[in-house]
Amino acid sequence: RCGRRGDALLRRNEAGHGAARSGLRHRGGAGTRFGGTDTHLLLVDLRNTDLTGKDAEERLERAGITVNKNTVPFETRSPFVTSGIRIGTSAVTTRGMADAEMGAIAAMIDRVLRSGGSDSVVDAVRGEVQEMCEAFPLYEPAGAGSAS
């Protein structure tokens, strides 16, 4: 569990890139729990913040970042609200993203969650997410890279 202004670590799946670490600073100090380096999932405990998992999920979705609200150990909230979010990294490793991109994603998540849902912050982050996705496409568009 992280301290008051602690860092959470994003870990990428072993098959993709191993255990890369990127800092995710979160207001009030969000705790993290890992399943080890053989997993691509990160559980962020938001109980030390004023956010619920549902609120965090909705804010990040507006910014183009997909996470899932998730219960945490010893959960006290309803499973429809939750006290945590689950972040999976397989989608970004599939795109070929590495440590630098993981750090940038962590910073984007942090900005959105700290913003209180600010439309200007959410819009700015959504633009950054779009640029990153364009730089790391899931597949090469038809005709791209082929010699004519």
Image (cartoon, grey):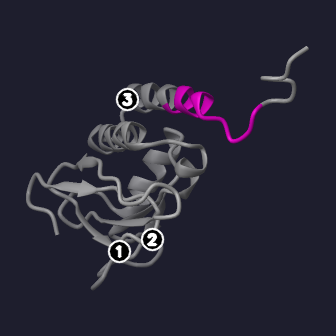
| Residue receiving disc 2 | 39
Badge 3: how crowded within 10 Å, few (<14), some, or many (20+)? some
Badge 2: how crowded within 10 Å, few (<14), some, or many (20+)? some
x and y percent of residue 143 in the render?
87, 24
Image quadrant where one finds the C terminus: top right
x and y percent of residue 128 in the render?
47, 27
For badge 2, the amino acid type reads: Thr
**Label 3's element?**
helix
Asked whether the residues under the numbered discs 2 and 3 touch, taking CB atoms below 8 Å apart as contact, a structural biologist would say no
* Outermost residue toward the right in this view: 148
Asked whether the residues under the numbered discs 3 and 1 touch, taking CB atoms below 8 Å apart as contact, a structural biologist would say no
Q: Is residue 112 above or below residue 18?
A: above
**Separation of marks 3 and 1 at Cα, in angstroms:** 33 Å
Badge 1: how crowded within 10 Å, few (<14), some, or many (20+)? few
x and y percent of residue 89 in the render?
48, 56
| Residue receiving disc 1 | 36
Q: How many marks?
A: 3
| Residue receiving disc 3 | 121
Displayed quadrant of residue 79? bottom left
Chain-order first, disc 2 or disc 3: 2
For badge 3, the amino acid type reads: Val
**What are the residue bounds of the magenta stretch?**
129-140
**Label 2's element?**
loop
For badge 1, the amino acid type reads: Gly
What numbered label is drawn on residue 105?
none
In this view, the mark in front (2 or 3): 2
* Outermost residue toward the front in this view: 147
Asked whether the residues under the numbered discs 1 and 2 touch, taking CB atoms below 8 Å apart as contact, a structural biologist would say yes
Near-viewer residue (119 or 140)? 140
Q: Is residue 20 above or below residue 147?
A: below
